[in-house]
Image (cartoon, helix red, strand yellow):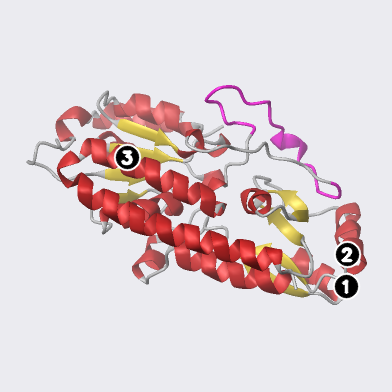
């Protein structure tokens, strides 16, 4: 549960009239969009043609699962035209933030409402975090579902189109430009998706092993791969039991896997042990969860990350 009470107390003192701060789309103001995480920020950057109108809340590469909004973050949300968030279990703070923002004209989009989602699962050998139990999700409640939807290029294309539609409704005077930009970007996403499929179709094997957390469920499902992993994608655990470690080592040997995988910002000690015992190498896939504004300013983007991931995937499957 996010620590929201302290934020509410702060807001009682700042008492910002958000509706007065919000820019209007009658030609007298600029578009303002707030995003929680990097992937949707980059989709929107490609739709708009620049990031001038965008604010990234998790701009320091902080983990989505541990983020807590500040009073200033809520002010930014409340004074924007569009607020885009993931909508999973890590975004439980959003409901309270929107109430505090007190802006009935604010348009909001939860990305998990835009695509089909999968329940977070625990497969054989995986460490089960009993403090992170999920309940079955109903309707718009995505609390039991894997929230790493952006790691599917198919989802990325669908989300980009729907974000474009939303932006066009807000800033209709520039709609044709946004539609053209989105079409070009979706073409690139679809082309990369076909490259992934080609690699998988021609690979020697169809199984991956993560000696780490596993946020790549959507990528696995897209290309009908199988996997083994130490932890679920949203797990807060970082230390594996002897049983989990032994399982990963045995599977790596049994399947003659050339590499075991970790994700960005991984501590890596578990993978090092599996590697030492099995002889497999170690490679890292980027989950797009730790991209900071400094990285973005250096030219990091979603497509390039997914292209780099394809290179890693090619090596892991051959």
Is 176 a magenta residue?
A: no
- Image coordinates of residue 235 in percent, x first then y, are 68, 45
Of circles 1 and 3, the one toward us is 3
Decide: is 165 above or below 190.
above
Residue marked by disc 3: 165
Earlier-in-chain disc, 1 versus 2: 2
Q: Secondary structure at mark 3?
A: helix
Residue marked by disc 2: 249
Q: Is residue 17 left or right of residue 84?
A: left
Decide: is 45 above or below 305.
above
Q: Are discs 3 and 2 less than 8 Å apart at CB?
A: no
Highlighted range, magenta: 124-144
For the residue pair 294 and 258, the one nearer the viewer reads as 258
Magenta stretch secondary structure, dominant: loop
User: In this view of the protein, can residue 70 be seen by the observer?
Assistant: no
Q: Are discs 1 and 2 less than 8 Å apart at CB?
A: yes
Residue marked by disc 1: 278
């Amino acid at each position: 549960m996010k620590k929201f009470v302290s934020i509410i107390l702060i807001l009682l003192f700042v008492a910002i009239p958000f509706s007065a701060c919000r820019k209007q789309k009658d030609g007298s103001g600029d578009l303002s969009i707030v995003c929680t995480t990097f992937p949707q920020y980059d989709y929107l950057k490609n739709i708009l043609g620049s990031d001038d109108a965008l604010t990234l809340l998790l701009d320091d590469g902080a983990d989505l699962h541990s983020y807590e909004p500040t009073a200033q973050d809520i002010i930014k949300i409340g004074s924007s035209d569009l607020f885009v968030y993931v909508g999973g279990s890590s975004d439980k703070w959003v409901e309270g933030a929107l109430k505090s923002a007190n802006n009935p004209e604010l348009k909001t989009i939860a990305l998990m409402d835009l695509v089909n989602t999968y329940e977070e699962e625990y497969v054989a050998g995986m460490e089960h975090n009993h403090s992170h139990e999920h309940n079955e999700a109903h309707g718009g409640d995505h609390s039991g579902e894997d929230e790493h939807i952006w790691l599917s290029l198919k989802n990325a294309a669908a989300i980009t189109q729907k974000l474009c539609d939303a932006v066009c409704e807000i800033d209709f005077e520039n709609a044709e430009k946004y539609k053209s930009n989105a079409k070009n970007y979706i073409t690139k996403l679809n082309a990369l998706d076909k490259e992934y499929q080609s690699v998988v179709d021609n690979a020697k094997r169809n199984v991956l092993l993560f000696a780490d957390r596993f946020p790549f469920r959507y990528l696995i499902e897209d290309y009908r791969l199988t996997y083994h992993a130490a932890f679920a994608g949203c797990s807060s655990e970082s230390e594996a039991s002897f049983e989990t470690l032994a399982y990963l080592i045995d599977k790596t040997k049994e399947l003659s896997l050339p590499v075991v995988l970790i994700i960005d910002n991984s501590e890596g000690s578990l993978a090092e042990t599996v590697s030492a015992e099995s002889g497999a190498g170690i490679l890292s896939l980027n989950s797009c969860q730790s991209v900071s504004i400094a990285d973005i300013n250096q030219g990091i983007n979603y497509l390039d990350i997914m292209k780099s991931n394809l290179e890693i995937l090619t090596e892991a499957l051959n």
